[in-house]
Amino acid sequence: MSGPITVRLLDLFRIGLGPSSSHTVGPMRAAGRFRASCLRRGVRMDRVTVHLKGSLSATGLGHGTHTAVLAGLHGWEPETCDVDDVQNLPVTLGLDPLIAWGDGHVRMHPDDVSFLRYHEYKHEDLPHPNTIVFYAHQGDALVHRETWCSLGGGFVRRAGETESKFDKERPAPPPYPFHDTQSLVAIAIANDMTLGGIVLANEAAWEPTSGATARGLDAVWAAFKNCISRGLEREGDLPGGLFVKRRARELLSRVENGIVERGYAPVARAQAYAFAVNEENAAGGRVVTAPTNGAAGIVPAVLVEFAERQKLTRDKIHGALATAGAVGMLVKTHASISGAEVGCQGEVGTATAMAAAALCELMGGTCRQVENAAEIAIEHNLGLTCDPIKGLVQAPCIERNAMGVAKAWSAAQLSLHSVVSNVVSLDRVIKVMKRTGDDMRREYKETSEGGLAVSLPEC
Ligand code: SF4
């Protein structure tokens, strides 16, 4: 396995808005880049139109991609935008479609964001399963056009560009370069460090100002906790017409009232936290990719529950986030964290492995045990398809995160109490995830055309 790790820790944990990192955060960011590009080039234009293709189109309104694109064209950022303003855009722009653009205005009507069907373009020609084409018009003339890809986890790239921002901006070689799990574990053991310690040391060498990574991780942790609190406060149906009821609050109250068996309480509490995060995500609230929005509940649920119970220090929390991040970096580099590319094994499978690795380390696991925990978690998510009903990130996604919590817990325990190492390495299982994703039919990769997504009769 070769290829440098070019993913930054805080790129895996991005504060944004729901319901999907690839279908909401990524398109919003791509639209913002298109706007910036037009303004930088001085494109004279009076109207924007947008074509959504591939999975971005197949999931329809359910993933909120059209709203995210409208927000990005305003220049709003996922990290800082007002969530209510974003959700109101289809209505406000329907009434008044002019948006501020440089010194003037351009027209951006919600109906000008089109969900193209498969027969309207050649699917095999798409540069990525999540493709967006932006068109700038002046009168009847098309004056500029850009194609962008949403790569999963909020990452975006303009079609045809291969060089990452990281490659351009990396100021110095990292002190502990690693390119796969084997090299990462070997470096950590040789230096008597944890996997997360290696990641943090590398990040420190690259940060623009001293302490930037630690401050970023503090913000991520605060966003985890805020999201859990908000999700636990709310009740009622989630939006979208599937009439999925919020369950986080009720689940937690059963734990707190001793209705859940005592020995299972930590897992059940963490599962309630996962419900809280994923219900907020489904409602378009503010969440953190970990490593994606659809799988945003597992890492915060497992780590916040453990941190509260064990009263973890700030350093321990940062180390756990970095260990989780190490696993995300390895999967993102050598397979994918995008449901549209490899199915849900890349989203919930990766998040489960990230949480398992961090938890195993917090429970005293060695580097090898941490690797084994992550491997077990991915191995038992291999082949997991992405089939959200009605294109909403609700069913099976919310429960799937709660199951990811239980699996992460089990994987950490299994690894800690096994006397021999796993037969399959983490590097190998990541390779298998990629191959399985490549073999998976399109219907099972965030298109809502297969599996559970077609199991309910249309009402
Ligand atoms: S099924 Fe999994 S990959 Fe697909 S939208 Fe839901 S959480 Fe994301």
Image (cartoon, grey):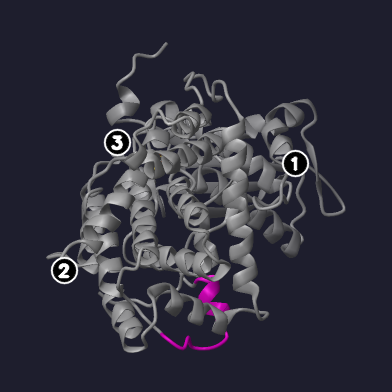
CA neighbours of label 1 inside 10 A, class few (<14), some (14 to 19), many (20+): few
Q: Secondary structure at mark 3?
A: helix
Amino acid beneath label 2:
Ser
* Residue 100 badge: none
Locate the N terminus by quadrant. Answer: bottom left
Image spot of residue 389 (x, y percent): 39, 27
Q: Which residue of the protein is positioned furthest toward the top in this rendering?
A: 459
* Residue 139 badge: 1
Which residue occupies 47% across, 29% down? 257
Give the image quarter of residue 353. bottom left
Q: CA distance from mark 1 to mark 3?
A: 39 Å
Q: CA distance from mark 1 to mark 2?
A: 66 Å
Is residue 285 something one can see in this rendering? no
Which residue occupies 36% across, 66% down? 361
Q: Which residue of the protein is positioned furthest toward the right in this rendering?
A: 103
Judging by the rendered image, the residue that carries numbered circle 3 is 443
Image spot of residue 88 (x, y percent): 71, 31
**Left of 400 or right of it: where is 375?**
left
* Residue 421 badge: 2
Q: Secondary structure at mark 2?
A: loop
Image spot of residue 266 (x, y percent): 40, 44
Q: Earlier in the sequence, mark 1 or mark 3?
A: 1
Task: Confirm if mark 2 falls within 8 A of ligand 1.
Answer: no
Magenta stretch: helix, strand or loop mostly: loop
Amino acid beneath label 1:
Gly
Image spot of residue 31 (x, y percent): 63, 50
Locate the C terminus by quadrant. Answer: top left
Q: Which residues are magenta?
A: 164-176
Q: CA distance from mark 2 to mark 3?
A: 36 Å
Amino acid beneath label 3:
Glu
Q: Nearer the viewer, residue 91 or 57?
A: 91
